[in-house]
Image: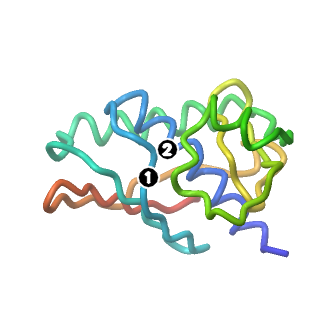
Amino acid sequence: MSQPKDRAMHTAEHVLNQTMVRLLGCGRAFSTHINPGKSKCDYHMDAPPTAEQAQAVEEGVNAVLARHLPVTEEFMSREEAGRLFDLARLPPDAGRTLRIVRVGDYDACPCIGEHVANTAEIGTFRLVSHSFENGVLRVRFRLG
């Protein structure tokens, strides 16, 4: 079982991913590394975000966290999930029934990780830094 900080960081990643999709029009992170102290997510992008866009991402994530959204799970067939979500990152042996994690009405995606029960448990999201190279935006973030 993961520690509370790990669950908070992982749940924050869900909110960050959806915020990136909504504000910058990119897909969800194709690579992530979640640590209790500092985490990173990599996104395919055509250009680096402006300082204003980066600030908007941080503010957007914090606005969602401040809504104190419930984090719930549901199960659905792989076939049904395939109609609703991109399953490309799932391993073939993920099974015929998939777990979908929802962050209130803001985000939903297949996930096997552990999460907090409510975004109120996460605290403040801080975008520590970001870098852009060869079409990849790396976002580094902390909580607290």
* Residue farthest to the top, as pictured: 105
Residue 31 x/y as whole percent:
43, 63
Please give the name of the residue rendered at 41% of the width and 38% of the height, measured from the top-left corner: 20
Cβ atoms at labels 1 and 2 below 8 Å apart: yes
Quadrant of the image containing the C terminus: bottom right
Residue 72 x/y as whole percent:
83, 40
For residue 55, above or below residue 95: above
In three-dimensional space, the C-alpha distance between marks 1 and 2, rounded to whole angstroms, equals 6 Å
| Residue 29 numbered tag | 1
Please give the name of the residue rendered at 18% of the width and 54% of the height, measured from the top-left corner: 135
Q: Amino acid at mark 2?
A: Asn
Q: Residues within 10 Å of mark 1 (few under 14, many from 20)?
A: many
Q: Nearer the viewer, residue 132 or 108?
A: 108
Please give the name of the residue rendered at 26% of the width and 35% of the height, measured from the top-left corner: 53
The reply, left or right, for residue 60 in relation to residue 74 is left
Residue 28 x/y as whole percent:
45, 45
Quadrant of the image containing the N terminus: bottom right
| Residue 128 numbered tag | none
Please give the name of the residue rendered at 42% of the width and 34% of the height, measured from the top-left corner: 21
Element at badge 1?
loop
Q: Label 2 belongs to which residue?
A: 17
